[in-house]
Image (tube, helix red, strand yellow):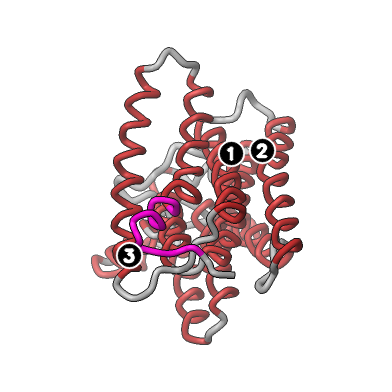
């Protein structure tokens, strides 16, 4: 009976209709890593850089653990007959990365905002994204639970820094996070089984290091403030344009350079991380879109 509940998706088929399919396709697109890693820079530039950094740290740790656990378990996805056309990934099923990242990201947002209305939105997003993977037939209940449990534990147990930290405590927290950014990928790489880590894992690891290195540089030499009013839109547009142009140019350069793939992936991840948390904030201050902190 338990096995049937965990692995059987026959109950999903009668639920499918045109309207629900559109809804859950929308939810599943909001659960791809691309969405989370597009949202994080905007939160950092335009909302609250300290809160955004805490959420980014949790999300990046979750992403690295997701890659590691998928390789560890190598659990196949449900039979292809259940998957809706165009939505069956090639990766392993356990844990559900959508569920893992949704809990950490939206749960982290709810923990930082601390309002009833946003907590409700976060719950809707988490449940909708998780259920969309069942609805589309690309994960079974075991995969969903496999993402929900470590996501919940990470969200509850990991606090890299605390709101209100200042001075030495804040710098110490940043240093410890930087150490984590270096140590976690190395530990997971050392424990990796079944071949070498995929390029996405290497890229994500170097992005984590670049993000935290840029964050430390920003804290020590810039300490920009949140843009006010319309300037938030200016910061978002400026940051997105610079990021898109730089990422495209960097990708073209690294693809043509005589480098090993892993070297190109490390270089690209480091540069994009630094760009988001340090270089773009410098540009935003230089252009007057935002300012340095007066404290």
**Which sits in the foreground, 47 or 126?**
47
Callout 1: 10 Å neighbours few (<14), some, many (20+)? many
Residue located 30% across and 45% down the image:
86
Does label 2 or label 3 sit earlier along the sequence? 3
Residue under label 1, please give it: 205
- Badge 1 vs badge 2, beta-carbon distance below 8 Å: yes
Circle 1 sits in a helix, a strand or a loop, which is it? helix
Quadrant into which the N terminus falls: bottom right
Image location (x, y in percent) of residue 73: 65, 40
Residue located 35% across and 62% down the image:
289
Image location (x, y in percent) of residue 148: 61, 61
- Badge 1 vs badge 3, beta-carbon distance below 8 Å: no
Q: CA distance from mark 2 to mark 3?
A: 40 Å
Callout 2: 10 Å neighbours few (<14), some, many (20+)? many
Residue 187 part of the magenta-drawn span:
no
Does label 1 or label 3 sit earlier along the sequence? 3
Circle 2 sits in a helix, a strand or a loop, which is it? helix
Circle 3 sits in a helix, a strand or a loop, which is it? loop
Q: CA distance from mark 1 to mark 3?
A: 38 Å
Quadrant into which the C terminus falls: bottom right
Q: Is residue 274 above or below residue 225?
A: above
Q: Which mark is residue 185?
A: 2
Report the side of 234 relative to 222 (left or right).
left
Q: What's drawn in magenta, residue-wise?
A: 281-292
Residue under label 3, please give it: 16
**Which sits in the foreground, 20 or 215?**
215
Seen from this angle, which residue lies furthest front? 294
Does label 1 or label 2 sit earlier along the sequence? 2
Q: Quadrant of residue 27?
A: bottom left
């Amino acid at each position: 009976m338990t096995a049937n509940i965990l692995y059987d998706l026959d109950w999903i088929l009668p639920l499918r209709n045109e309207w629900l399919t559109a809804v859950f396709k929308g939810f599943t697109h909001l659960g791809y890593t691309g969405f989370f890693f597009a949202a994080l820079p905007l939160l950092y530039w335009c909302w609250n850089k300290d809160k955004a950094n805490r959420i980014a740290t949790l999300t990046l740790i979750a992403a690295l653990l997701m890659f590691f656990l998928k390789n560890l378990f190598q659990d196949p996805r449900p039979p292809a007959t259940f998957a809706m056309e165009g939505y069956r990934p090639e990766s392993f099923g356990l844990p559900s990365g959508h569920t893992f990242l949704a809990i950490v990201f939206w749960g982290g947002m709810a923990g930082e905002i601390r309002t009833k209305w946003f907590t409700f939105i976060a719950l809707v997003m988490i449940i909708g994204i998780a259920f969309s993977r069942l609805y589309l037939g690309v994960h079974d209940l075991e995969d969903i639970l496999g993402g929900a449990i470590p996501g919940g534990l990470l969200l509850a147990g990991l606090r890299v820094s605390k709101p209100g930290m200042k001075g030495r405590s804040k710098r110490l927290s940043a240093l410890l996070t930087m150490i984590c950014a270096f140590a976690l990928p190395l530990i997971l790489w050392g424990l990796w089984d079944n071949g070498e880590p995929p390029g996405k894992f290497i890229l994500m690891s170097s992005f984590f290091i670049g993000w935290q290195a840029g964050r430390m540089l920003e804290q020590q030499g810039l300490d920009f403030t949140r843009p006010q009013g319309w300037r938030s839109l200016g910061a978002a547009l400026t940051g997105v344009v610079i990021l898109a142009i730089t990422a495209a140019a960097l990708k073209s350069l690294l693809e043509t350079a005589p480098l090993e793939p892993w070297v190109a992936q490390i270089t690209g991840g480091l540069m994009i991380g630094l760009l988001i948390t340090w270089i773009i904030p410098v540009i935003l201050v230089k252009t007057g879109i935002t300012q340095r902190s007066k404290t």
